[in-house]
Image (cartoon, helix red, strand yellow):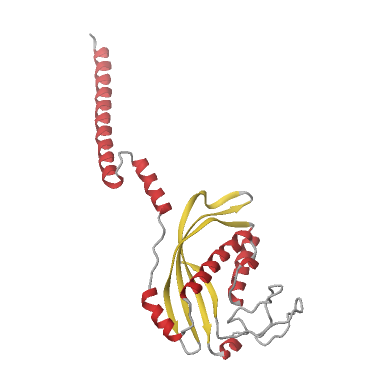
Amino acid sequence: MDGKQIGVIVILLLILAVIVILFYVFIRIRRKVRYYSRMLFGTESLVDGVKSMEREEELTPKSVSSATGLYLPSILQDFPGFHYEEMKSRAENVLLSYLRSIDAMNEGLLTEGTSQFRENLRLRIGALQKAGLREHFEEMQLHRMEIYQYRRQRERCSIVFQAAIGYIHYVEKDGSITEGQRDRLKQSRYNIEMIYIQDRSVIDDLGGDGIGLNCPNCGSPISGVGAKRCAYCDSLIVEFNIKTWNFSSVKEV
């Protein structure tokens, strides 16, 4: 056996040694991965474990900050005629109609709200239209809603409901999805604020935007608190009672 053959054998042995070492390292890493995967996810497959965790996150509703028990007695003391279940139902309808309005690009689907709230919704839809985007909220499921905050001031009071909701959310442009996923649920949380105006000067200072003034016939905004007829369809308007609850905002938190 000459030196050349010995050199070839040595190289082959080195290659074999490297393969054995790499195989040993691979086995060790795989065992470690399986060990930690079992500890973290209860499965030997890390990929299956991550998918399981993502699926659990997809199906688990967000928690809400419930202060209903804390604030409701004070609200009932200040407003004996306040009906909690009715107001909660109204807040649910406002949240769902708000998201449907964005999905349909139609602010008229919002069930109720102040003029400023409706204007903010109109601006959001307008910004989407200008950018050539469509934002979708599908298969909405409201999980829980509670009172989150109550603030009482001389001129106005506000109650904030907090809701946990799940939906399919994605944004499209020219038929392509730019954000979110069409086949995945998203869990989210929203604050829905309702206000009670006690001082008419607040309305005057805000130019009529403190409360929602809309024509009952065509839905167009009314020019002012004292307006008697709609400027768009000439329908008769009953003067709005400022001392009532109305919704002022919906915000994802």
- Residue under the point 53% across and 88% down: 198
**Would you say residue 114 is visible in this rendering?**
yes
- Residue under the point 38% across and 70% down: 66
Residue 43 horizontal side relative to residue 238, left or right: left
Residue 88 horizontal side relative to residue 103, left or right: left
The residue furthest right is 234
Find residue 251 and report its horizontal and vertical position in percent.
50, 68
Looking at the picture, tell me which residue is in the foreground, 195 or 16: 195
Which quadrant does the N terminus fall into?
A: top left
Residue 19 horizontal side relative to residue 81, left or right: left
Query: In the displayed structure, would residue 58 be above or below residue 238?
Result: above
Residue 78 horizontal side relative to residue 115, left or right: left
Query: In the displayed structure, would residue 94 be above or below residue 202?
Result: above
Query: In the displayed structure, would residue 19 be above or below residue 238?
Result: above
Residue 248 position by quadrant: bottom right
Looking at the picture, tell me which residue is in the foreground, 24 or 107: 107
- Residue under the point 40% across and 83% down: 74
